[in-house]
Amino acid sequence: MDTQENIIKFNHVSFKYNSDEPLALSDVSFDIPKGKWTSIVGHNGSGKSTIAKLMIGIESPAEGHIYFKDKCINKEDLNYLRKHIGIVFQNPENQFVGSTVEYDVAFGLENHAVTYEKMRELVPKALLDVDMLDRAEYEPQSLSGGQKQRVAIAGVLALNTDIIILDEATSMLDPAGRKELLTLIHQLKADNDVTIISITHDLSEAAEADHLVVLNEGTVFQTGLPQSIFNYADRLTDIGLDLPFSIRMNQYLSDTTEYITYEGLLKKL
C-alpha cells in the first residue's frame, strides 16, 4: 500500500452480524486516498454503515484486514484508531451532550484530557472553521438541522482527527441545508489537512466527491473518479441508484449517459 496516497485500506474484508445470517460484506477491497473526499455510496442494505462501523472499530472483520496508515488494525489498536478518526452521524442530536454549542464542542476535548487553556484556543477555532462562532452560547436544540451538523463537525475538528466520516449527514436536511453542508465539506478539505469520507445513498451528493466507492449487496461494485463511474450510468440504475439530475437531463437531451456537471449542462442549454 502506498502510504503517501492512501490512508485506509480494506483488504478482502468480510463481515456478518450473526453466525446464522448471510454476510453483510463479502470480500470487500478498496482504498481511501489521503487528503481527498471519498464518497461511499449504495442503496439501503448495501453495506455502507457496516463499513463505517468497521472503520472506527465498533465492529471487527470476520475475514480480511483493515489498514490505517499502513498499520493493520486489531482490537488492541482501537484507542489509537479513534484518536485519528471522527464520525458525524445522520442525527447530530444523538451526539449532543453540552448545554451550549461551545460546551458541546469542548466535551470531546475534555474526554481526551486537554487542558482548559488549550480548550479555550481550540473550541473557537473549530467553530470559526464551520462558521458557527457567533452561536457559541446558543443551546444546540435551538439550531437548524444544518447548523447542528456544523456543530457536530466542529466537535470532530477540535480533536484534530485525520479523518472525518459523515454517515448520511445530509439525509435529514432540506435542499438549502444540504447545499450549505456540501459547500462546507469542500472548504474543510481545502483549508484543513483532513480526509473526508461521506456515507450516502444519494448519487447527487456522491458526484461532489473526489473519489467514489460504489457498493451493491455487500460487495464493491465499482471504485474510481466520479467522471469514470458516471460514464456507466446505466449500470448504476441497474443496481437501484438514482442518477443525478444533470445526468438524467443530459440523457433526455442528447441520448447519452456520459458524466456531466450542472454547470456543464447549463452550457449545453
Image: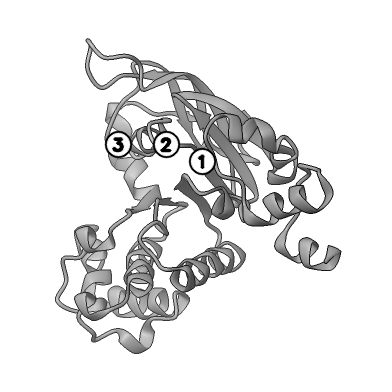
Q: Which residue is mark 2?
A: 48
Q: Secondary structure at mark 2?
A: helix
**Residue 258 as seen in the image, left or right of residue 197:** right
- Rendered image quadrant of residue 24: top left
Residue at image position (47%, 52%) is: 162
From what the image shows, is residue 105 above or below residue 194?
Answer: below
Q: Which of the numbered marks, if any, corresponds to residue 41?
A: 1
Percent from the top left, x then y, of residue 184? 52, 69
From what the image shows, is residue 106 above or below residue 91?
Answer: below
Give the amino acid at mark 3. Leu
Percent from the top left, x then y, of residue 123? 33, 76
**Looking at the rendering, in which quadrant would you find the N terminus?**
top right
Mark 2 → mark 1, Cα distance in angstroms: 7 Å
Give the amino acid at mark 2. Lys
Residue at image position (51%, 41%) is: 40
Residue 113 seen in render: no
Q: Which residue is mark 3?
A: 78
Contact between marks 3 and 1 (CB within 8 A): the answer is no
- Residue 217 or residue 120, whichever sits in front: 217
Q: Secondary structure at mark 3?
A: helix
Residue at image position (36%, 81%) is: 124
Mark 3 nearby-residue class (10 Å; few <14, some 14–19, many ≥20): some
- Rendered image quadrant of residue 104: bottom left
Q: Nearer the viewer, mark 2 or mark 3?
A: 2
**Residue 269 as seen in the image, left or right of residue 56:** right
From what the image shows, is residue 247 above or below residue 77?
Answer: below
Of the image marks 2 and 1, the number of the one nearer the N terminus:
1
Of the image marks 3 and 1, the number of the one nearer the N terminus:
1
